[in-house]
Image (cartoon, grey):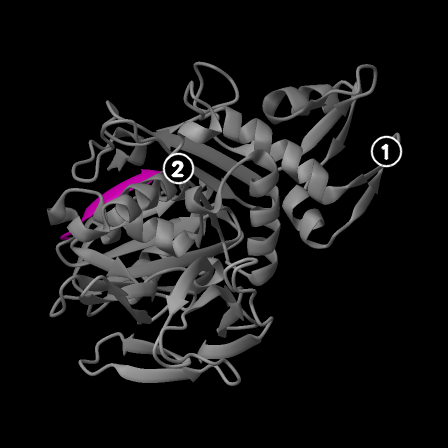
């Protein structure tokens, strides 16, 4: 067994001025890492120099005398000696839109923003936020609420939409796994996590007859270990054998504080039976960094990841450049449905309609959609200038809004607007 932090990673290493930051956020704990040229793998950051204290409580402590907000080990110290007021579970409170009364009333979202600013500063390059290629936030679950909150905070911190990615722990596990040596993910890859309560398993598998290979991660709870530590080893060994029965698994990762303490003996033999195994704590935050690097090299990637929050179709619009007709991508398969947004201007001539082609994943024939712009007059040499915006509706709905904006004083727009649902 080797610690995850000791792995020498191959493959998608940063080059040039690339800089990736991965932030794992939980209700109780947060971790941050960065990945830049010269590093063999992402580097997890600690709030205490020279230590491996990577878990940062998702909390702040306000110094009673100075009013300064502290985080990490200093926040814990001030709270313990009674010199500070401690506020924890900041993400959960921000999602509930709580107001927190201390010396004055604070919005939990504002405190969460202060916390994230301090965490991100630990991993920034000299050029600051603008010099970062991608910020990837990874969480247990991606919901509309957390996406809206993180996008709001990111905008306030100066992070652009192009820099921002939001994903869940499953996708971070996938990215970590496929950025290792190929023999480590030649077949399926398994992960077991344990923090003293329930054992969870994530199982990464591939459709290998596609190019690129389509990867998915299944997740399930395996239950709890016995109350007495003496029974953990045999119980976990049984869980492992049952979970991996009939599956060809190249590598197993063990993460979480619950696996510490040297209690694994029989279960370690079950884990390592014909497989490689690694143990550590920072897999998700490092996987978030790898996701940024993978996103920057999609054309080189041997794999593509899909889950319920990924778009499963390409949506293209036909456009003309001079004498050539080309397809302009509105949506790419594999993109996060929570972050599919696009705005552009286009010139329309010929017919009062926009043609879209939808290519569902795994199907050869596209679906043609014609969006009629009712009431718009396009004839002869008259051309219309349109503003087109693509944005998400509720659930998995994708909406396209078209506005006739005209050509200023020369040819004012009609003010007509059209909205279409182009995917469901």
Which residue is nearer to you in this view: 325 or 54? Answer: 325
Say if residue 269 shows up in the picture: no
Give the structural element (helix, strand or loop) at label 1.
loop
Which residue is nearer to you in this view: 13 or 296? Answer: 296
What percent of the width, then of the height, locates residue 313? Answer: 32, 72
Looking at the image, residue 360 lies above or below residue 236: below
How many residues crowd around disc 1 within 10 Å: few (fewer than 14), some, or many (20 or more)? few
What percent of the width, then of the height, locates residue 366? Answer: 24, 81
Q: Which residues are magenta?
A: 274-281
Q: Earlier in the sequence, mark 1 or mark 2?
A: 1
Q: Would you name the residue on which mark 1 appears?
A: 102
- Tell me if 298 is positioned left or right of 48 in this view: left
Give the structural element (helix, strand or loop) at label 2.
loop
Name which residue lies at 55% across and 46% down: 26
What percent of the width, then of the height, locates residue 130? Answer: 45, 30
Quarter of the picture holding the N terminus:
top left
- What secondary structure is the magenta-colored segment mainly? strand
The quarter of the picture where residue 237 lies is: bottom left
Q: Which mark is residue 282?
A: 2
Quarter of the picture holding the C terminus:
bottom left
- Tell me if 382 is positioned left or right of 251 in this view: right
Looking at the image, residue 287 lies above or below residue 174: above
How many residues crowd around disc 2 within 10 Å: few (fewer than 14), some, or many (20 or more)? many
- Tell me if 184 is positioned left or right of 175 in this view: left
Which residue is nearer to you in this view: 351 or 49? Answer: 351
Looking at the image, residue 257 lies above or below residue 381: above
Which residue is nearer to you in this view: 365 or 276? Answer: 365
The quarter of the picture where residue 277 lies is: top left
């Amino acid at each position: 067994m080797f610690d995850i932090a000791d792995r020498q990673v191959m493959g998608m290493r940063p080059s040039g001025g690339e800089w990736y930051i991965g932030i794992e956020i939980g209700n109780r704990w947060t971790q941050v890492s960065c990945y830049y040229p010269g590093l063999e793998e992402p580097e997890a950051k600690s709030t205490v120099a020279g230590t491996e204290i990577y878990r940062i409580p998702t909390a702040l402590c306000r110094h009673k005398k100075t009013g300064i907000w502290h985080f990490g080990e200093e926040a814990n110290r001030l709270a313990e000696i009674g010199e500070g007021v401690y506020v924890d579970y900041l993400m959960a409170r921000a999602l509930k839109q709580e107001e927190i009364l201390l010396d004055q009333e604070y919005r939990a979202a504002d405190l969460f923003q202060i916390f994230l600013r301090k965490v991100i500063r630990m991993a920034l390059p000299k050029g600051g936020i603008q010099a970062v290629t991608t910020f990837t936030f990874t969480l247990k679950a991606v919901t509309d609420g957390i996406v809206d909150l993180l996008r709001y905070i990111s905008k306030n911190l100066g992070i652009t939409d192009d820099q921002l990615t939001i994903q869940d722990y499953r996708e971070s596990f996938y990215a970590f796994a496929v950025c290792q040596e190929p023999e480590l993910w030649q077949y399926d890859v398994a992960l077991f996590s344990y923090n003293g309560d329930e054992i969870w398993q994530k199982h990464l598998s591939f459709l290998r007859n596609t190019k690129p290979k389509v990867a998915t991660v299944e997740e399930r709870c395996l239950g709890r270990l016995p109350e007495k530590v003496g029974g953990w080893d045999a119980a976990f060994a049984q869980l492992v054998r049952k979970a991996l029965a009939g599956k060809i698994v190249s590598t197993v990762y063990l993460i979480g504080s619950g696996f510490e303490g040297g209690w694994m003996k029989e279960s370690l033999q079950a884990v390592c039976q014909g497989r490689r195994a690694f143990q550590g704590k920072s897999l998700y935050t490092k996987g978030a960094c790898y996701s940024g690097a993978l996103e920057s090299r999609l054309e080189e990637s041997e794999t593509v990841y899909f889950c319920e929050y990924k778009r499963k179709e390409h949506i293209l619009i036909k456009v003309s450049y001079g004498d050539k007709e080309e397809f302009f991508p509105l949506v790419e398969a594999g993109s996060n449905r929570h972050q599919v947004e696009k705005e552009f201007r286009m010139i329309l001539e010929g017919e009062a309609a926009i043609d879209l082609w939808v290519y569902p994943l795994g199907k050869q024939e596209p679906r043609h959609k014609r969006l009629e712009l009712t009431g718009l007059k396009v004839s002869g040499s008259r051309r219309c200038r349109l503003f087109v915006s693509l944005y998400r509706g509720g659930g998995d709905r994708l909406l396209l809004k078209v506005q006739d904006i005209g050509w200023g004083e020369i040819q004012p727009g009609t003010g007509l607007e059209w909205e279409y649902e182009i995917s469901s």
